[in-house]
Image (spheres, rainbow, N blue to C red):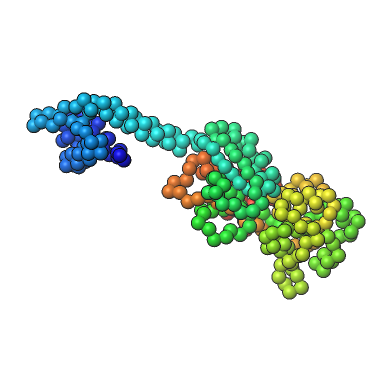
């Protein structure tokens, strides 16, 4: 049948104002436009809703029955608009966030309590994926991506950046010795990533002057796994500052080759599908995380604060 809201509005306005002319003035439409809407509505319903005479309009029995439904339709639309306006003012609804486990555990999880207190009507769902996911397929609102972004149809918001450092446990260095040069790394157990291989580019110069690309002695898919291996004394790892702040402060992970480590930072972005207007629950989450980055003591630098 495919009734349109314009047709329903025209019908109710004519009934309420007593004439097509008055209804047209109230709706800001032409008389002919309102008349055509009524004609289309009656055609779709295959019935006569209004008896038209030269002096007045009168509802038919079918018109009186349909008027009840028409008012309900318009009331439902008004209610939906009101609810959406309230959601824009007070963020609410389910928010699905995806991030690699290190960022989830070391950055987002500590912020959850404050976020929930500020936005109690938002129901958070936190998911951890070590690989890039399809947001639509996984029904995800926001994903946090660490490192350079690939070409994408997604909208990206820069949140900040985090420095890379070579780290090892005191126990490992006590047994294996502390490397003094990049060449000394050849004699050490190097902890690296299974993929992508670009994560095995370390922030020190190789013999040709480029970033050192390592072949891991022991590889893992997750940065959190590599952190745990480094803490267990299994070798030297290259890890982002955001996940090792507490370890470095406690002295359970120590910098290696700090004097010659380059200032290489991983960019951090939030990505989400482009919308004509960003949902309030997504916007407030991005603002909240962006504001907290740089003030969390974990070695992140807020976007725009880097020098």
The one of 231 and 160 positioned closer to us in this rendering: 231
Point out the image quarter for the N terminus.
Answer: top left
As drawn, the residue found furthest toward the front would be 46
Count the marks: 0
As drawn, the residue found furthest toward the bottom would be 208
The one of 70 and 245 positioned closer to us in this rendering: 70
As drawn, the residue found furthest toward the right would be 175
* Residue 88: image location, x then y, percent: 45, 38
* Residue 41: image location, x then y, percent: 24, 37
Residue at 56%, 32% in the rendered image: 120
Point out the image quarter for the C terminus.
Answer: bottom right
Instruction: Indicate whether 31 appears above or below 100.
Output: above
The one of 235 and 43 positioned closer to us in this rendering: 43
Residue at 53%, 58% in the rendered image: 152
* Residue 208: image location, x then y, percent: 73, 74
Q: Quadrant of residue 166?
A: bottom right
Residue at 48%, 43% in the rendered image: 279
In the image: residue 138, left or right of residue 63: right
Residue at 68%, 63% in the rendered image: 198
Q: Is residue 37 visible?
A: no
Q: Quadrant of residue 172?
A: bottom right
In the image: residue 297, left or right of residue 138: right
* Residue 95: image location, x then y, percent: 55, 40
In the image: residue 292, left or right of residue 67: right
Q: Is residue 52 visible?
A: yes
């Amino acid at each position: 049948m495919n009734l349109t809201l314009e047709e329903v509005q025209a019908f109710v306005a004519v009934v309420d104002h007593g004439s097509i002319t008055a209804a047209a003035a109230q709706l800001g439409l032409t008389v002919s436009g309102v008349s055509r809407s009524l004609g289309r509505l009656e055609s779709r319903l295959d019935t006569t809703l209004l008896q038209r005479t030269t002096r007045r309009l009168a509802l038919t029995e079918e018109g009186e029955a349909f008027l009840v439904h028409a008012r309900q339709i318009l009331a439902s639309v008004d209610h939906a608009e009101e609810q959406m306006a309230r959601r824009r003012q007070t963020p609410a609804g389910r928010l699905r966030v995806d991030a690699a486990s290190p960022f989830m555990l070391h950055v987002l999880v500590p912020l959850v309590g404050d976020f929930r207190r500020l936005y109690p009507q938002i129901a958070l769902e936190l998911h951890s994926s070590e690989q890039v996911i399809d947001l639509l397929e996984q029904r995800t609102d926001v994903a946090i991506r660490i490192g350079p972004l690939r070409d994408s149809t997604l909208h990206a918001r820069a949140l900040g950046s985090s420095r890379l450092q070579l780290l090892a446990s005191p126990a490992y260095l006590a047994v294996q010795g502390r490397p003094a040069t990049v060449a000394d790394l050849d004699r050490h157990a190097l902890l690296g990533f299974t993929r992508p291989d670009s994560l095995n580019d370390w922030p020190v110069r190789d013999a040709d002057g480029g970033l050192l690309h390592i072949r891991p002695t022991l590889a893992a898919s997750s940065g959190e796994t590599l952190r745990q291996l480094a803490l267990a004394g299994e070798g030297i790892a290259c890890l982002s500052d955001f996940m090792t702040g507490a370890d470095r402060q406690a002295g359970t992970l120590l910098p290696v080759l700090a004097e010659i480590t380059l200032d290489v930072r991983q960019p951090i972005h939030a990505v989400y599908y482009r919308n004509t207007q960003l949902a309030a629950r997504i916007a407030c989450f991005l603002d909240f995380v962006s504001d907290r980055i740089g003030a969390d003591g974990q070695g992140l630098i807020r976007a725009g604060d880097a020098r």
